[in-house]
Amino acid sequence: QVQLVESGGGLVQAGGSLRLSCAASGIIFSVNTMGWYRQAPGKQRELVADITSTGSTKYADSVKGRFTISRDNARNTVYLQMNSLKPEDTGVYYCKAHRVITSRPWDYWGQGTQVTVSS
C-alpha cells in the first residue's frame, strides 16, 4: 500500500520560513520523481517544485529563489524549504510521487498539509 504523508505546515507571518516533509512508503522511492503542489482556495492545484530521480529540479516562477526542494533517498523523504513566505503562498500543499512504467504514468498523492501565511 502506497502512503505519502506530509508534515510541517502551519501558520507563519509573511517573511517567515517553513519546511515541509513528505515521507513515502510502499514505493521504490529512489526511482520516482517527487513533487510538491499547492492549491489555494478557489484555484486549481499547481506545481510548486519537483525533483527527479537524478536530482534535477524544477520550480514555479513564483517561488524561484525562495523555495528549495530536496530529497533523501535513504529516508524515503522529500522536503520543501520555504523562505521569504508571502500571503499568496497560502494553500494546501500536496506531495506527489510520479513514475512511468512501460509508457504508463503512475501517480500517488498525499493528503496535504495546510500552509497559511499572514500579512
Image: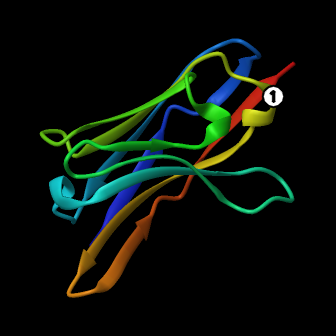
Picture coordinates of residue 27, whole percent (x, y):
21, 65
Question: Does 59 sit above or below residue 84?
Answer: below
Against 60, residue 34 (above or below) is below
User: Measured from the top left, where is residue 110 in percent x and y?
Assistant: 47, 59
> Badge 1 local density, few (<14 within 10 Å), some, or many (20+)?
some
User: Which image quarter: residue 84?
Assistant: top right
**Image location (x, y in percent) of residue 28:** 16, 62
Looking at the image, which residue is at 36% across and 53% down? Answer: 34
Residue 88 is left or right of residue 111, and the answer is: right
* Image quadrant where one finds the C terminus: top right
In the rendered structure, the answer to whether residue 69 lies left or right of residue 17 reads: left
The quarter in which the N terminus is drawn is bottom left
Q: Amino acid at mark 1?
A: Pro
For the image, the number of numbered tags is 1
Residue 42 x, y percent position in the rendering: 86, 59
Q: Label 1, on which residue?
A: 87
Quadrant assignment, res 68: top left
Taking 12 as reference, is 119 left or right? right
Q: Secondary structure at mark 1?
A: helix
Scheme of image coloration: rainbow
Q: Nearer the viewer, residue 79 or 5?
A: 79
Residue farthest toward the top in the current orientation of the protein: 15
Pick whichever, 109 or 63, lies toward us: 63
Q: Is residue 65 above or below residue 77?
A: above
Q: At 40% from the left edge and 69% from the top edge, which residue is drawn?
A: 108
Which residue lies at the image location 34% right of the left edge and 41% below the top edge? 78
**Outermost residue toward the left in this view:** 74
